[in-house]
């Protein structure tokens, strides 16, 4: 409450709250956390990887899938996303593309990271997005601002919650064979560094 009032001059107990501004106040607190985390990690020769989405560079108040108001989002706006990129050693972009990778998504974030010599990863949603396939990975690899694909999601074949995750999390722990086959097909086709 106090931080919102100090920043925006509004008493949120008596006046309406702007949800994006509230998410931005949370982002201010998280920026301070990242500053401390970066100092601590770098002092121990460790790396800080920060996850961002396109909506951090161009927010809109919406419940659409990749927007800040989507139910699974943490409701934190990186209003100072350039500072987050500066603090990080690597960036992961967590936008869902559903097999239609668009290099314009989060372009400003990727460009800032590239200019600072920081690697950018793009999430590959194996189950939810069905994105582990040669065509999709080729589109991602063609983006000069991206340095790699980060495979995401586990498999729970007992309940079929995530039916195509990479690693089985119940019973014998190991790679889920249908996904391993898809991964091998991608690796055979796409050149990685």
Image: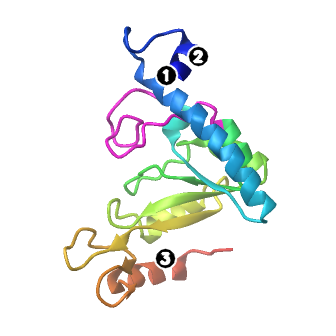
Q: Is residue 124 visible?
A: yes
Figure quadrant of the C terminus: bottom right
Location of residue 43 with respect to 32 vertically, above or below: below
Q: Is residue 145 magenta?
A: no
Rounded to the nearest angstrom, the CA distance separating label 3 from label 2 is: 48 Å
Horizontal side, residue 64 vs residue 93: left or right? left
Q: Is residue 76 magenta?
A: yes
Comes first in the chain, label 3 or label 1: 1
Location of residue 150 with respect to 175 vertically, above or below: above
Q: Position of residue 150 (x, y in %)?
A: 53, 65
Start-end of magenta stretch: 59-81
Rendered residue at 40%/16% (across/down): 17
Task: Judge by depth and name the residue closer to the eye, 132 or 121.
Answer: 121
User: Would you call the spot at circle 3 few (<14 residues within 10 Å), some (14-19), or many (20 or more)?
Assistant: some
For the rendered model, the colour scheme is rainbow
Asked which secondary structure carries label 2, the reply is helix
Rendered residue at 56%/74% (across/down): 190
Q: Position of residue 30 (x, y in %)?
A: 58, 40
Q: For mark 1, what is the residue?
A: 21
Horizontal side, residue 156 vs residue 145: left or right? left
Label 2 with label 1: CB-CB less than 8 Å: yes
Q: For mark 2, what is the residue?
A: 7
Rounded to the nearest angstrom, the CA distance separating label 3 from label 1 is: 42 Å
On residue 186, the disc is 3
Rounded to the nearest angstrom, the CA distance separating label 2 from label 1 is: 9 Å
Q: Is residue 108 visible?
A: no
Task: Judge by depth and name the residue closer to the eye, 160 or 145.
Answer: 160
């Amino acid at each position: 409450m106090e931080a919102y009032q100090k920043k925006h001059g509004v008493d949120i107990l008596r006046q309406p709250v702007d949800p994006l501004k509230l998410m931005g106040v949370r982002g201010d607190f998280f920026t301070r956390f990242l500053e401390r985390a970066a100092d601590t990690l770098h002092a121990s020769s460790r790396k800080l990887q920060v996850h961002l989405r396109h909506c951090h560079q161009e927010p809109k108040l919406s419940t659409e899938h990749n927007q800040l108001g989507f139910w699974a989002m943490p409701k934190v706006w990186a209003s100072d996303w350039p500072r987050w990129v500066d603090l990080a050693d690597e960036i992961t972009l967590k936008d869902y593309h559903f097999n239609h990778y668009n290099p314009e998504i989060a372009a400003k974030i990727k460009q800032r990271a590239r200019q600072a010599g920081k690697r950018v990863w793009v999430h590959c949603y194996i189950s939810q997005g069905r994105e582990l396939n040669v065509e999709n990975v080729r589109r991602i690899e063609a983006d000069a601002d991206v340095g790699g694909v980060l495979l995401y999601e586990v498999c729970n074949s007992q309940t079929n919650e995530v039916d195509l995750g990479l690693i089985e999390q119940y019973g014998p722990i190991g790679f889920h064979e249908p996904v391993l086959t898809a991964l091998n097909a991608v690796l055979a086709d796409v050149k990685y560094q």
